[in-house]
Image (cartoon, helix red, strand yellow):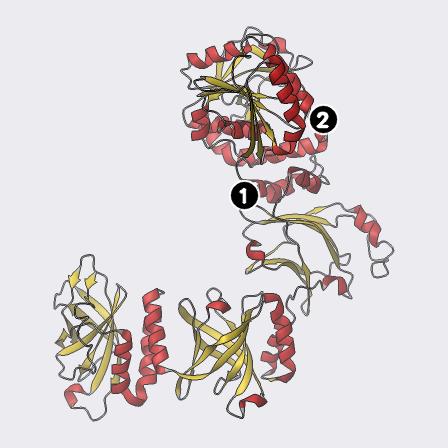
Amino acid sequence: MVHLDPAAGAAKKEPACLPLCGEKALVTPIGEDLALITGVADAMPDSVQVLLNGDPSMTMTASVITWKRNNAPAEARIGFVAVLPIRLQTKVRLTSVVIRHGHPFRYALVRPAVSVTSLVKVIVEDTGDSFGEVSNAIVQALASGGGGAKRSAAAIAVLTASARTDGWVEVMGSLDTGEVFLQGWAHSLPDDVTHVIVSHDGFGPAEIRSAGVERTDLGGQGRGFVALLSTANGTVLPEKLQKVFFRTKDGWRTLDVYERKVLLPTTDVPAHIREGIPRANASQETMSILRRAGERFDGRDTVSHLKQPVRMGMDMVVEIPGGGLLVAGWMLDPEGLVESVMLRAGGGSTRVDNAWTRLPRPDVSAAFAGNELFAGRMDPQRHDHGFLAFVPGVSAAGDVPVYFEFEVDPDSIAFYPLQVMRAMSRRTLERLVSPLDPRTAAAAIAIERHIGPMMQATEHPAPRIVETRDFGFDDAGAAKALVVGAGADAEEIGVTLSLLALDPEARDIPVIISAPIEAFGTIAAEVERLARFYHVGVRLIASEGVQDSCDSFEAAVHATKADTLVFLSAGVLPRRSGWLSGLERAYRKRGGKALVSPTIVFEDDSICFAGTMLDESGRGLSDRYLGYPRDVIRGAEASEVMAGTTTCCIVSRKVIEAAGGFARSYLGTSDKGRDLCLKLRLAGTPSVWLPDVEMVSADNTASAGLPWRRLAQRIDRWSFDRKWSLLINNMN
């Protein structure tokens, strides 16, 4: 980096004129990688080699801007500004430059360095009528090197010094397509297309398409305009807009932004354009563009007023925590007139009709069967009017307008506003996807394209404890704590707590019952009654964000200081005594460096869990002996498995915390538990299956509905395989 030391002479007055001796030059630093060298010469090409401090090892190529000086001697008839890119690895104090054009000429740099504002004054005084061309070239040179706050400030300073105020912008606002609507008055702004430079957070090229509007309030000193401002790169925020620069034959002009400007909401802009069009004059193309802009979304549902047989209705629009929108509804288009459907939210947009999953909606067919517009046009055998789509990369944050844009034909556009929900419960998702048959290819496509990616993108917050009650609970100095993951069933909690209280091994261990906040009022009284009756120490915690036992376990991790945790889902009960000591012995045998799970059987003595291992392909996981009679594992030895089960296990609290707890991108507990076990395995804590310890699990999932359970399992398996298949294959 070259050290230009612009503050070295801060107390001295900056040079007020151009050095004319041909041996000195002014230097103006622009950031840390650019400098303007200004002086006079007898001649100067457009590009020169420059040696910093006369050192051949520090040679740069500079572009040069020149002008002819009036009434100047031959040796000083050319003024120049050399735009010098400075990129050196070490700090060097720049005191002189040698410029090679024919013979080398050495220029000592005048101290102190000159600010851009002072440099512009010097150039204005020396160039006279040619300042417009010179300033334009300087601005282009500053812009060609890429963005940067200091380059932007320098370019704006040059433009501001060279431009005359031509008018004012009084009203502005963004269109949903990204253009900025401008309304105001000017003296010289041409109609139709004008290339401009805009000053906002930075500066850059843009284009204005304007139409003139006669205004009696200007007294013939100008005329009004309505215009659309667009940029090739990015979007200009109206509230950030400062100036608009444009060239005329007489030099630069600027449209300044009125201090008391009116900022229009996006949905108000089209109506404002429509109001101004009858009084505007421009070419047919410009007027057509302005009319189309006036037809953009203004908050109204225009689909319902189409004369064509096209209608829409929405069931749900949900913003997914982590990014994206889930949209579900129906569209009736029996003649296939809709060319495309775009989802727009703020500045983001994407086409959805070419990717959404169609769902059966016979209710829509029935509702429109007697409608005159649709009579005779609908196929009685087709009811796939519903749709479901997850759209990543689109956000409704900041209460931006969210809507569908329909292109019914090249000349017909309609809009449908959407109301966005900020949260979606498990029950809502179940209702949303329930029309899908989990056995069909349509379900597989919906999972792969929409539901699966949505679940992976979802960033639900971790469960948060909001209520705690202790009934004789004391975990000070306790080596372990027993955590019961509870649901909303008070009777189930009562049975589990009673059996633990009657178990000699478990009754003296601190018990934490973790439940969703929705169930707290239902179970609190029963937990308190049983704790007092059996004289056991119980801590009842209720948390937000708990949807299953895994969430309950995670909340409880932060509710105790015990080093070891025993997880037990409510409804999973000991088959015989000694289960807890058996788990603990196997756990201690591994030095506390394992997650140890027992065998779990259903009430009919068929196996629910006997270790999760690699499947026959070696690329996935499967639960061994699932559904087999328990006799098939008689005599089996304790063994390490790919994953245990968190339904009942013993594990270190610290390793759970270090692994980040359970993932929240699954609908069920099975793959959620596997996910945690694999994370622990990668961190050095394997899973161990203990066959001679048995627990009994009641199959209480029937209430969820078999189709939904199957669909949830397919969704979770897709998410799990997407995350773990490659690592599992490498483990094999």
Q: From the viewer's perspective, is residue 563 above or below residue 15?
A: above
Left or right, residue 68 beside residue 406:
left
Q: Nearer the viewer, residue 39 or 727?
A: 39
Label 1 SS: helix
Label 2 SS: helix
Residue at figure coordinates x 57%, y 43% from the top left: 453
Give, as a three-letter code, the residue at label 1.
Answer: Ala
Q: From the viewer's perspective, is residue 241 above or below residue 20?
A: above
The residue carrying pointer 1 sits among few (fewer than 14), some (14 to 19) or many (20 or more) residues within 10 Å by Cα, namely some
Real-space Cα separation, disc 1 to disc 2, in angstroms:
29 Å
Q: From the viewer's perspective, is residue 285 above or below residue 720?
A: below
Residue that label 1 marks: 457
Residue at figure coordinates x 16%, y 84% from the top left: 20
Q: From the viewer's perspective, is residue 24 above or below residue 443?
A: below
Residue situated furthest top in the rendering: 635
Left or right, residue 670 beside residue 118:
right
Residue at figure coordinates x 58%, y 36% from the top left: 545
Q: Position of residue 384 (x, y in %)?
A: 75, 48
Residue at figure coordinates x 61%, y 31% from the top left: 516
Query: Tag 2 or tag 1, which sits nearer the N-term?
Result: 1
Res 578 visible? yes
Q: Position of residue 478 (x, y in %)?
A: 45, 17
> Image quadrant for the N terminus?
bottom left
Residue that label 2 marks: 702
Q: Position of residue 98 (x, y in %)?
A: 14, 72
Res 292 visible? no
Give, as a three-letter code, the residue at label 2.
Answer: Ala
Q: Nearer the viewer, residue 59 or 370?
A: 370
**Can you tell which quarter of the image residue 336 is in?**
bottom right
